[in-house]
Amino acid sequence: MLDETIFENKSFALRANEMKQSDGSIHLIVKDSLVEVQTKDKPLSWIIPEEIEGYPLYRSEIPVLQAAYRLAASEAHKLKSKEQHFSTGDHWNTLWTRDTAYATHLGLGFWDVEACRESLKMRVDRGEIIQDTGTGGSWPISSDRIVWALGAWEVFVLTEDREWLEWCVEVLDRTCVRDEAMIMDVAGLMKGESSFLDWREQSYPAWMTPSDIGDSVSLSTMVLHSQCRLILSKMYKALDDESMAVEWMKKSDWLADLINKFFKCSESDLFGQYLYGRGYPILSPKIDVLANLLCLKDHRLAPKHKGNHMLSQLPHCDYGVPCFYPQISSNKEWYHNCATWPFVEAYYLQAASMVENEEAFMASMSCLVRGALVCGTNKENLSLQAGLPNGLVSSSDSQLWSVSGMLGAFYKGLFGLQADEHSLMLWPFVPKALEGSHRLIGLSYKNTTLDITLKGYGNQISCCLVDGKPVAPVISEHMSGHHTIEIELIQSECLCSGVNWVASDDFDLDYPKWEIDQDGLAWGSVEGADYYRVYKNGIPIAQTEMLKYKPIFNSANAQYQVMAVSLSGKESYLNAPNEYMNHSGRTETRPCGLIGDDVWISRASSSPNALCYDVNIVYDGMYRIDAWYSNGTYDLANGNTCAIRSIYLNGQRVGAIAFPHCSEHSDWQYFNYSTSLEVPLVAGIYQVEIIKDIYDDNMNYEVNDMMLKHVRFTRI
């Protein structure tokens, strides 16, 4: 067994006790309690941690798997504080909502559900889920805080704690209601930044401001909003409140329908990255891998017959899945771009187990194990091109969701543990390369402790014995005490296979940069582009090999963008919108009393509200409302002081706009446009008020400040 290769691709080969890079740069071998790593620079070694009593133990005949599991368990134990909660990682000595929720959902709940519960509790303030820091000062630009629901539900199904459930329902209901008041657009889509891809320069075109990102609609965050409402429906049902369960299920279904309607890629079963633009949204066809993996867990988005097709179309590089594909060519500092994140890989592995894709499972497990053993820690991220942290802006050791992803690879992947409200099901999936005995000892589930043994290999159970008696592979919620489970596996016909191997240096095209031309539209040449596609108001209208285009201007408003395209089908992002407005296409108003270059200073603590001069809407139609403002409270990438105000027209609230941090260096002299509202209006005179109302607290709750010069109404 030790001499057999259990996985091999172009870059490395994994055996039961060693790993070799194809270019000879790294040779790793597991000897007893030591992992020795030979590199071109210097030899490294680390001691495999001892087993931690009181937590689930894993044992097998495959040394690399045992070493990887013990390392993850040891790091999980190290991240657990005296206060019984988890910190995020060695470099991030704090608690974050998304990290905690994803980690719990991936499998950390099976390792220590009580610490997961305490960690999730700490991410609630004033009855709402706390949004992690993100672009422009956090919520509502970053709006994936509802990922908390995944962890909260996992805690419930592992404990059946009704008190927890009753509290979670209040938290999620309150959070979702305020999200709907703040970030739901006119079509019912939930706006905001991509989940976890929260360094804007890593995953968005450079021209997009924090406000543009706040107005975009990302697949990952949309899926989480749909899943959150599904979980809320399940929670209400478990509490015997059928009417509320139905109400939230309808909302979840509505969001799932919108995803199917707006995010489907035209040439695959996958979904696109996000809708972006200014008033005329376009779907980016890039593939957000985590988002698609989250879709795979939802039968409304990935029917069973399509599951493996979707998985086998997802991009996978030699050292792991990319965060998105293809990579952004213009970005030279790598963090999300050009990196693989083990927690995303772990979701890929669990999906492979779910659809029984043996090739994908082995690729994923091997990449996870290789990365952890070579580094001697579960890194936050690794370079796609080298499978090492070298060259990345940041890569923490002992990252919580990486640790949890490794543990979950065993619990939910190999052993196939699946908990619901009433039981724990076992649907193990052991590829032939991992044939043998796999043992999970001391797993806690509600009032039960389980010792589970898998024998053989395959995707079908031929025999399941509980305490020596043949039964179905289901552990009831009513079972208590200590029990042994033995499962014999057999191989049945496997129709699922395939990995979409892609190059780690497969980059997109840069987007065209506008140039000045008095006769029409002009842009600079893009390396690798064979032609350019011209868009008007979000619709492609022309293709040209030239670097200019002469539009026919008329009385209608027009917004133009250009995309670079290669003959092989590579596409750039669209460039920044270029607007041509007629005299009645836009009108502006200012807070009453402002003259010249005056600004209205709005602080949460004083003068938060303003009455503006009335506006005259000449034509019926859909109008985009935004404001020219400054918010220098903090920089673009950090903090929690995105300002928020509601817009009232003729005394009626029509929604809210956000005023995110808008400069790199907390500069109050820098002005930009806010996020927008799209509102259907009929011709007439409108009184305009800007008000900080009950919905407009940010994640800071105290500092909620901005300066404003004017508000504009643009007909789209």
Image: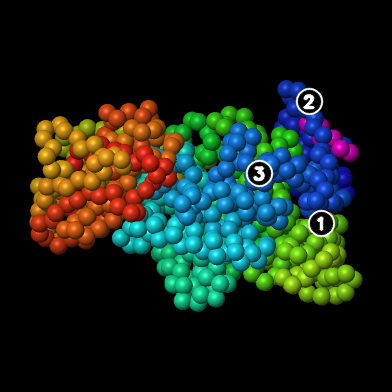
For mark 2, what is the residue?
43
Q: Is residue 455 magenta?
A: no
In what element is the residue under mark 3? loop
Q: Between 79 and 671, which is closer to the camera in this rendering? A: 79
Magenta-colored span? 32-37
N-terminal of the pair, mark 3 or mark 1, is 3
Select label 2 or label 3 by which is in front.
Answer: 3
Q: CA distance from mark 3 to mark 1?
A: 23 Å
Q: Which mark is residue 345?
A: none
Residue placed at 27% from the left, 28% from the top?
669
Judging by the rendered image, the residue that carries numbered circle 3 is 83
Neighbor class of circle 3 (other Cα within 10 Å; few <14, some 14-19, many 20+) is few
Which amino acid is tagged 1? Answer: Gly
Q: Say the numbered circle drawn on residue 442.
A: 1
The amino acid on which the numbered mark 3 sits, given as a three-letter code, is Glu
| Residue at the image position 54 percent from the left and 36 percent from the top | 335
Mark 2 is on which residue type?
A: Pro
Q: Place residue 153 in its image quadrant.
A: bottom right
> Could you tell me which quadrant the C terminus lies in?
bottom left
Query: Would you say residue 456 is visible in this rendering?
Result: no
